[in-house]
Image: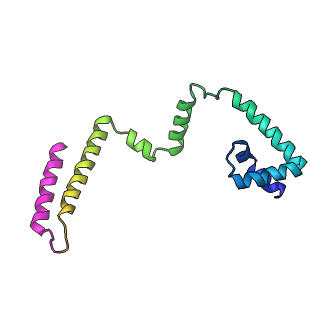
């Protein structure tokens, strides 16, 4: 094993994530290489010191700052701006329309076979009644 390969494996070795065969090769390299052995011990000590510390908590305003930067970066044409520009009533109406359309599409598609095709009068009657339903909501 070369030192370059050992350096790539050190984090996994410290975390105990090396498979047994790679760990044997890595340990053998550490026995024979003083530089890698010293670096591995330093990293192991550092990991131990960091492991004893409580996790760092973000500041109180970080979430707000991050979200405002995200919205600012996405610009007025972004999906978030478009969706949030509607009130909750409009959002609910759009979701209901989508679900109704999905249900109608599934109902129509369930009875569709190669031998059975919808006649033009059935389709136009359906579109007429769906249009009347949608216009009654407006």
Horizontally, is 37 left or right of 107 in the view?
right
Spot occupied by residue 138 in the image (x, y as percentages of width and height): 19, 43
Does residue 85 appear to the left or right of 114 in the view shown? right
Locate the N terminus by quadrant: bottom right
Residue drawn at (44%, 43%) of the image: 80
Name the one closer to the observer, 36 or 73: 36
Query: Which color scheme does this rendered protein use?
Result: rainbow
Check residue 129 for magenta coloring.
yes
Q: What residue is at 26 percent from the left and 42 percent from the top?
A: 93
Q: Which quadrant of the structure image shows residue 136? A: top left
Nearer-the-camera pick, 33 or 24:
24
Decide whether residue 73 is among the magenta residues. no
Q: In terms of depth relative to the viewer, which is nearer, 75 or 69?
A: 69
133 in relation to 115, above or below: above
Looking at the image, the residue that sits furthest to the bottom is 115
Residue 19 place in picture, x, y as percent:
68, 52
Residue at left 50%, top 44%? 75
Which is nearer the eye, 41 or 7? Answer: 41
| Residue lying at 23% horizontally and 57% vertically, measured from the top left | 106
Read off the magenta span.
Answer: 115-138
Residue 126 location in percent, x, y? 13, 58
- Against 91, residue 113 (above or below) is below
Q: How many marks?
A: 0
Q: Is the magenta stretch mostly helix, strand or loop?
A: helix
| Left or right of 110 in this view: 29 | right
């Amino acid at each position: 094993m070369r030192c370059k390969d050992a350096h790539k494996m050190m984090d996994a070795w410290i975390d105990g994530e090396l498979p047994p065969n790679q760990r044997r090769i890595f340990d053998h390299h550490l026995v024979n290489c003083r530089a890698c052995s010293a670096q591995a011990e330093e990293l192991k000590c550092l990991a131990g010191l960091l492991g004893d510390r409580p996790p760092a908590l973000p500041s109180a305003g970080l979430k707000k700052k991050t979200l405002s930067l995200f919205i600012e970066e996405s610009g007025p044409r972004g999906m978030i701006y478009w969706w949030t520009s509607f009130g909750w009533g409009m959002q609910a109406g759009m979701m209901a329309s989508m679900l109704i359309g999905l249900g109608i599409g599934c109902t129509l598609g369930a009875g569709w076979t190669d031998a059975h095709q919808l006649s033009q009068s059935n389709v136009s009657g359906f579109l007429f009644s769906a249009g009347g339903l949608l216009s009654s909501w407006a």
